[in-house]
Image: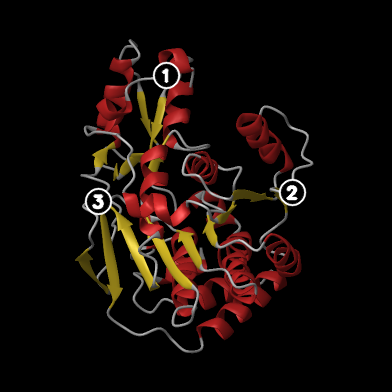
Amino acid sequence: MCASCRPQLDQLIGRTTDVSYTAAARSGVRGRRVLVTGAGGSIGGELVRQLHQLDPAAVYLLDHDEGALHAMQLELHGHGLLTDERIILADIRDYEALYREFQRVRPEVVFHAAAHKHLPLLERYPAEGVKTNVLGTANVLLAAEATGVGAVVNISTDKAAAPSSVLGATKRVAEMLTALRSGNEMKVASVRFGNVLGSRGSFLPTLDWQVRHGLPVTITDPDVTRFFMTIPQAAALVIEAAQMADNGETYVLDMGEPVRIVDLVDRYAATVGQPAPRIVYTGLRPGEKLHEELVDGGERRRATDHPHIWCTVARQPLDPDLQAQSDQLADLADSRDEGQLRAALWSMLPDAVVDAEMVRA
């Protein structure tokens, strides 16, 4: 989307997109060594930008995409030499590599944003979702615990609430694995939120491309709704939630009211001075919901001291065998037996709304 004709995002979602920080958020970052996984992505990159403004001792950028790391260093420091020790090329699937880097830089706070996030692709390639979202998250948590990290914040998604897709299921397991590491000196939490406007590969850049090139806009269903917020808003509230991290809670960001995608298209066309585009309805894809949820029936919601952050509390205790189950899941992902992999994944989520077709898909 071209910067010179970017629409006002608050007009699109019908509420303010302002960003601010509390004193607690600032003090939680100031003077500390902070590491961001997935630092080359949309959320990870914005976390890096905002963390730099809060006077940390250092911000370490970890990603397996060397091009994304190069782009972030160029943006932050005006060069892309890639010789700075704060630039870390590593894959979260590789525990030994993660451990070596954590041991080297000794981060005090970790924001874990690395993930596979495209729902249709993970329906087709569930093993990839398990390897990155489940095994990768377990590796980050274990490496952090082994090297004395003070706090880990896992970035989650609204699709983890009452999951109906491989994406939602793997991210829900990641939340559970995060909670499993609670009860020791390392503070842990997950932060759950919905769609972010303008993130790489998301709806808004796709819509912008289709509208500006006179193409029909593809929407799954005329009634489909989604929760939206801006990337800067989401990152700022994640930083706020990090200061609340304690005992494995899952925090949920205030996303406002869900927005009908059809309405978003009409507003967008008006803000960029284009006629209302022709819409082609493609139908919901496997695993997709008509309406997303932020909290499911297996959770209680309670307020926090921040007006735009809630906390969810699970009604049932975690399965003590969760780590062993996730290890078995990783083995199944290597075996490429998708039938067993899907069955094992869903069996870890007894409260999920699952039918036989989801398991077999």
Q: Examine the rendered structure and indicate whether residue 144 appears above or below residue 325.
A: above
The percent position of residue 145, horizontal first and vertical second, equals: 59, 75
Dot 3 surroundings within 10 Å: few (below 14), some, or many (20 or more)? some
Q: In 3D space, how far apart are the residues under numbered discs 2 and 1 (Cα atoms)?
A: 42 Å
Question: For the residues carrying marks 2 and 1, which lies nearer the camera in this image?
Answer: 2
Q: Residue at x 31, y 48 (%)?
A: 22
Question: For the residues carrying marks 3 and 2, which lies nearer the camera in this image?
Answer: 2
Dot 1 surroundings within 10 Å: few (below 14), some, or many (20 or more)? many
Q: Are marks 2 and 1 in contact (CB under 8 Å)?
A: no
Could you tell me which secondary element the residue under label 3 belongs to? loop
Query: Is residue 317 found left or right of 93 in the rendered image?
Result: left
Q: In 3D space, how far apart are the residues under numbered discs 3 and 1 (Cα atoms)?
A: 33 Å
* Residue under numbered circle 3: 308
Q: Examine the rendered structure and indicate whether residue 223 appears above or below residue 79.
A: below
Q: Nearer the viewer, residue 245 or 43?
A: 245
Q: Is residue 318 visible?
A: yes
**Residue furthest front in the image:** 31
Q: In 3D space, how far apart are the residues under numbered discs 3 and 2 (Cα atoms)?
A: 35 Å
* Residue under numbered circle 2: 85
Q: Nearer the viewer, residue 319 or 148?
A: 148
Q: Examine the rendered structure and indicate whether residue 135 appears above or below residue 80.
A: below
Which three-letter amino acid code belongs to the residue tagged 3?
His
Which three-letter amino acid code belongs to the residue tagged 2?
Glu
